[in-house]
Image: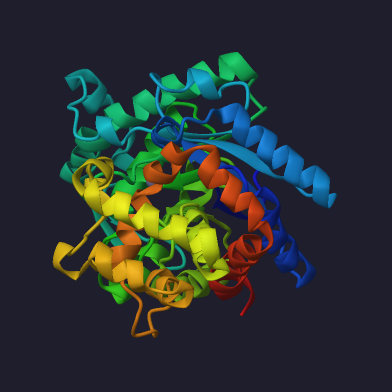
Amino acid sequence: MLLPRYSMGVGDRFARQGIAQLDAVMQAQEQGVAVAPVWNKSHREHTIVGSTPADVRAEADAAVKARGFTQPYFVDADHIGLKTVSGFLEASDFFTLDVADFIDTPPQPKDLAAFVEKRRRFLGILEIPGIDTSLEITEKTIADAAKKYLVAVKEAGKIYRHVAEAKGEDRFVTEVSMDETDTPQTPVDLLFILAALAEEGIPAQTIAPRFTGRFNKGVDYVGNVKQFALEFEQDLAVLAFAVREFGLPENLKLSVHSGSDKFSIYGPIRQALRKFDAGVHLKTAGTTWLEELIGLATAGGDGLKIAREVYRGALERFDELCKPYASVIDIDRARLPAVETVETWDGEAFASALRHDPRCPAYNPNLRQLLHVGYKVAAEMGPRYTGVLEQHAAIVAKNVSENIFQRHLRPLFLD
Ligand SMILES: [Zn+2]
């Protein structure tokens, strides 16, 4: 099973926007670029919403059927490990093996020694075609990478073999993710991670490193864009090199776990993809839920009422809701509007505080991040929330589609 050159992780907390998301992909296709949609939902999200992987499969299949979509699409078991994978085996055909928790676990001394021994040929100055910078590789460089990542890669091997046994080897796409960790991986780290993946026999089609900078949920990139651009290009060069050198799958590409909406790095990503004639997988699932809230707010009436209610609930339960996402949000509590203020907002005021338009003076990234992680409040409303969603389905769908097409697909693949 092959993941096409361009793919995009879409997803949707309440499984109501399958068609709206697919419409954005089909609009891009009409304009000349094929991007495979990958419906993803992590174990964490399923637990909070109370949904199952089978629900995601049903949503994706129904949307594809409704629109007569004939191109490849996938259902991603996002950020799974050995402990959480079993519930995903049947419904998913894309597995994101998350081994970030195993980074920095020291390997067995004999494994470490064997790894370094096998990579001696890289010692010295390594010229990687496509980048000006050459990488200096010492014995210590190799050993350091192995100490940090070898056990994590071996864990990925265990998960991969577990999935392969259950599903059959060629019946799913494998991604390996190491993004949910504090220290970014350098291009040299990536080179030796890929060497280890190949040795472990994992046919990874995508790899999600931790890039430099902060990838907070639902808001723009925070960090040095130039540095990001440089490292992204180096990573692409390393990937191309590793495919030939280690015999990894030809279509191996980077997966950018964007945490959604990293608009300021879309330009550099796009340029780098062109320069290296490379593909990419972009995960940007979370904002569909925020587009639902924007749609509901602008619909007014009970839509606006429920949007305000979600904000009230999220503010009251700030600590509880933020906790599972602590490492990927930065909320300045002093800049969150009071519940009483939000009660006075009309639909447009609510929408413009929430909508990710950095040029709009009313845009409030603190409110946006809080609502981003506040979906539990809506989940607990159950049919009351989904009922209002269905009632305002048209305006919500319009916001969902436009967001994916205009803010993500266009700047990355079309403009
Ligand atoms: Zn991730």
Asked whether 227 or 282 is in front, the reply is 282
Question: Which part of the image, by quadrant, shows the N terminus?
Answer: top right
| 174 left or right of 223 in image | right
Which residue is depicted at the point 68% across and 41% down?
60
Q: Is residue 50 above or below residue 20?
A: above
What percent of the width, then of the height, locates residue 144? Answer: 18, 40
Q: Give above or below for 205 relative to 358.
A: above
* Nearest to the observer: residue 183 or residue 180: 180
Color style of the picture? rainbow
| Left or right of residue 33: residue 348 | left
Reply above or below: 153 against 290: above
Quadrant assignment, res 48: top left
Locate residue 218, reporting x and y percent: 38, 60
- Tell me residue 159's x, y (percent): 44, 22
Q: Residue at x 59, y 66 (%)?
A: 399
Instruction: Say which residue appears at 75% left-offset and 40% top-offset.
Output: 62
Q: Residue at x 73, y 38 (%)?
A: 61
Question: Quarter-wise, where is residue 411 in the image?
Answer: bottom right
Name the image quarter holding the C terminus: bottom right
Residue 224, picture quadrant: bottom left
Is residue 216 in view? Answer: no
* Viewer-closest of 304 and 357: 304
Whether residue 109 can be seen here: yes
Circle count: 0
